[in-house]
């Protein structure tokens, strides 16, 4: 199916952004090689390459050199862009009760969790869902307007309590800090379920893009450590193999994005998140590469036709099915990686929301 007309102008702007960023990176390299400074460095550096060793101890990672200010500017710009996206093409979330919590994580930074409570009659406990936002591991958060609005709408429409995890961003914190934060959040949710009005026997996970990677890794870690039985995992455009073996570069060609630019962009995500190239083969970094997918929770996986990550989600569904897990994958035609944001203007985005809500409602069974 052709790309939906809604994306045409956005694709033009995105292509220009990627090409300009690639040119800026090339100028920066040439500046390094040419000591007389003939070539000017870009005004704002891209995310710094990941350090060579993982952060294994506790506490926040120190700022990584002169790129820290550039990253802060990039994140402020991303937050402003997200705010404008919600106003222009998104759907505001309904008012509802939320509670804020801080959860300690052994050997890692504490993590903030916001619980979105559905309005339900009486005092009966409701299902609970741990949710993980997207953002290539290096931007995003539960305070981003489109993310907050989405969690509000899904909690109300599905009648589930959504516990959104504000996991640490890379490269200040690298893998496996985010997965350990996710596991600590799950243990906290189980322990506090009664106080939160959540049924501990009806828990699931939800993750988008990088958050889908963390959610999938959490199900593996939870199984391996003998944690509570999870009833569901909903993964939206997940990245589940950071080696890049399932990246579909045919998609980027169809979008008119040069191969070298696409590869550079995709590799930079893994380089930022992971402490080393070899870490990409670890199962909690690349859940698709786990030795076994047996005894994982039932999965609903959503992918997009014009998303180079579509192969990840579809291969993961196949791996789960081979292991005997109840799993399905649906590819949405004519749309891109960030489709779920555009609920005010794109029919496919509204269908996407409805399908996620239908999947979450399975927790009521």
Image (spheres, rainbow, N blue to C red):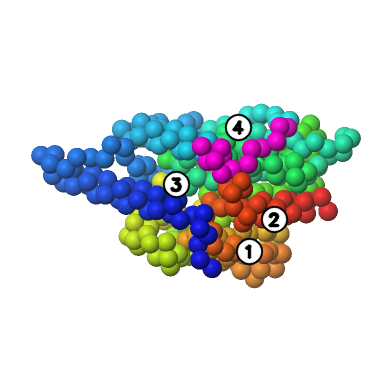
Q: How far is disc 3 from disc 2 in space, using C-alphas?
A: 30 Å
In this view, 38 is above or below 360: above
Task: Give the mark, 3 or 2, whose residue is nearer the N terminus.
Answer: 3
Please report contact status of discs 3 and 2: CB closer than 8 Å, yes or no: no
Do the residues bearing badges 3 and 4 touch, measured as CB atoms within 8 Å? no
User: Distance between the Cα atoms at labels 4 and 1?
Assistant: 32 Å
Q: Which mark is residue 273?
A: 3
| Residue 131 spot, x, y in % from top left | 64, 44
Q: What is the crowding at mark 4: few (fewer than 14 residues within 10 Å), some, or many (at least 20)?
A: some
Q: Label 2, on which residue? A: 355
In contact (CB < 8 Å): disc 1 and disc 2 = yes
The quarter of the picture where residue 296 lies is: bottom right
Please determine whether, in this image, residue 3 is positioned above or below residue 105.
below
Q: CA distance from mark 4 to mark 2?
A: 28 Å
- Residue 181: give x, y in percent of width and height: 58, 40
Q: Which residue is mark 4?
A: 112
Per the rendered image, the range of residues in magenta is 84-96
Q: CA distance from mark 1 to mark 2?
A: 10 Å
Q: Which residue is mark 1?
A: 330
For residue 251, above or below residue 133: below
- As for residue 92 lying within the magenta part, the answer is yes
């Amino acid at each position: 199916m052709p790309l939906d007309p809604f994306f045409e102008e956005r694709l033009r702007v995105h292509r220009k952004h990627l090409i300009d960023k690639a040119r800026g990176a090339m100028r920066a390299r040439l500046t390094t090689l040419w000591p007389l400074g003939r070539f000017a460095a870009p005004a704002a550096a891209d995310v710094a390459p990941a350090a060579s060793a993982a952060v294994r101890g506790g506490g926040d990672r120190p700022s990584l050199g002169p790129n820290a200010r550039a990253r802060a500017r990039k994140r402020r710009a991303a937050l402003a862009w997200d705010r404008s996206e919600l106003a222009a093409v998104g759907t505001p979330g309904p008012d509802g009760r939320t509670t804020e919590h801080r959860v300690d994580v052994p050997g890692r930074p504490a993590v903030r969790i916001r619980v979105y409570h559905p309005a339900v009659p009486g005092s009966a406990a409701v299902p609970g869902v741990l949710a993980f936002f997207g953002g290539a591991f290096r931007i995003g958060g539960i305070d981003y307007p489109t993310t907050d609005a989405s969690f509000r709408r899904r909690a109300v429409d599905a009648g589930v309590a959504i516990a959104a995890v504000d996991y640490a961003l890379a490269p200040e914190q690298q893998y496996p800090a985010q997965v350990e934060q996710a596991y600590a959040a799950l243990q906290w949710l189980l322990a506090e379920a009664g106080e939160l009005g959540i049924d501990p026997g009806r828990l699931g996970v939800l993750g988008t893009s990088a958050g889908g990677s963390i959610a999938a890794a959490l199900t593996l870690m939870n199984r391996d450590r003998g944690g509570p039985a999870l009833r569901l995992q909903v993964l939206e455009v997940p990245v589940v193999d950071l080696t890049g073996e399932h990246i579909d570069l045919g998609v980027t060609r169809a979008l008119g994005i040069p191969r070298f630019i696409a590869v550079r962009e995709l590799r930079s995500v893994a380089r930022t998140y992971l402490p080393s190239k070899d870490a990409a083969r670890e199962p909690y970094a690349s859940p698709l590469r786990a030795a076994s997918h047996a005894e994982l929770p039932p999965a609903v996986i959503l992918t997009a036709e014009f998303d180079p990550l579509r192969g990840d989600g579809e291969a993961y569904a196949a791996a789960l099915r081979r292991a005997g897990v109840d799993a399905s994958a649906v590819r949405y035609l004519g749309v891109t990686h960030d489709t779920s944001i555009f609920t005010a203007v794109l029919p496919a985005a509204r269908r996407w929301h409805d399908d996620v809500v239908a999947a979450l409602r399975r927790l009521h069974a």
